[in-house]
Image (spheres, helix red, strand yellow):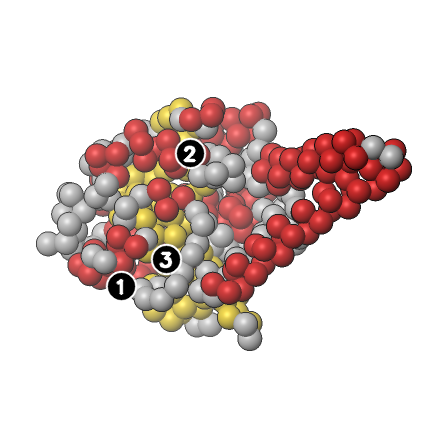
Amino acid sequence: MIDKPMDVLHLFPVRKSKKQKAAFRDAVIGYTRRLGYAPTTEKGMLGSKNVIVGDPQNAQYLVTAHYDTCAALPVPNLITPNNLPAFLAYQLFLTAVILALGILLGWLVGVLTQSFDLGYYTGYLALCLSLFLMLFGPANKHNANDNTSGVVTLLSIAATIPENQRSKVCFVLFDLEEAGLIGSASYARRHRGAAENQIVLNLDCVGDGDEIVLYPTGKLKRNAQKLAVLDKCCGTFGVKSVTVRRKGFAVYPSDQSNFPYGVGICALCKSKLGSYLGKIHTKRDTVLEETNVNILRAALISVITCDAVNQKGNVK
């Protein structure tokens, strides 16, 4: 049973199998019911099951996070949201490594068996297996940042937002993000009319880093009035900062991309090469700073409780 949001880190550290996910959903439903909400579970594509806390049709905001656990990888899924060359270079490097391993294995089998066909099919199967394991392989048992941090922050906001402000927001925990944003795509399709106007605040990997950045979708960037609402959460908090990436290249691959007015929210570390998100998908993903949770809880509640947005998500 979840008594406080941070309990998720210890009670439900892995949420990948059907049994693990079901136990987690039941705990979240019990916790939010004790807070006075009426949570529901909604089925989606490919067996995905999203947890909805609030009224998805009439809320002005969605606060979202994916709850499924990624597969364990030997190297981190390095993301550099503000640096296109570095982002592409790393993705190309991983692709090249996977291809090289498949080709090498196929060549070895071909040489040892003196069969070109056997070597070819071995290499091909090795590539397919590698891709399968990246998506559906054994669960990464260490996922404090990706995405227990987002789940904890979402539940913290749900627990502390004033009761007279709850009607403004709906909380949604998405399933199967790691398999290709499937849960959020299902939700966006089912609630298309409402979701087209709502500002979606998507929490993904917010637990490790001093630079907390909000990445609006292209459509939201072009809507100056709606974008201005996000300024309510910006500021400096000790060594931490919360900013909105308004201009320039930015790519943050997460569930917000399925919504016109989506905002991807993450915490980044800093280096000489720029801001980055590292460690995720590996056993090194063990950091969930409660300070980040507290900062985002206060910051996003200030956005949600602001009276600058009407029921259709338009700025007054």
Q: Which residue is mark 3?
A: 215
Determine whether label 1 and label 3 are within 8 Å by CB.
no
Q: Residue at x 79, y 35 (%)?
A: 116
Q: Which residue is mark 2?
A: 183
Give percent across and percent down for residue 213.
40, 61
Q: Amino acid under label 1?
A: Asp
Q: Residue at x 87, y 33 (%)?
A: 113
Which mark is first along the chain, 2 or 1? 2
Q: Is residue 11 above or below residue 281?
A: above
Q: Amino acid under label 3?
A: Tyr
Q: Is residue 54 above or below residue 288?
A: above
Q: Quadrant of the C terminus?
A: bottom left
> Which of 30 and 283 lies nearest the eye of the viewer?
283
Give percent across and percent down for residue 41.
39, 26
- Give the quarter of the image for residue 137: top right
> Which of 219 and 49 lies nearest the eye of the viewer?
219
Q: Is residue 2 visible?
A: no
Q: Which residue is mark 1?
A: 231
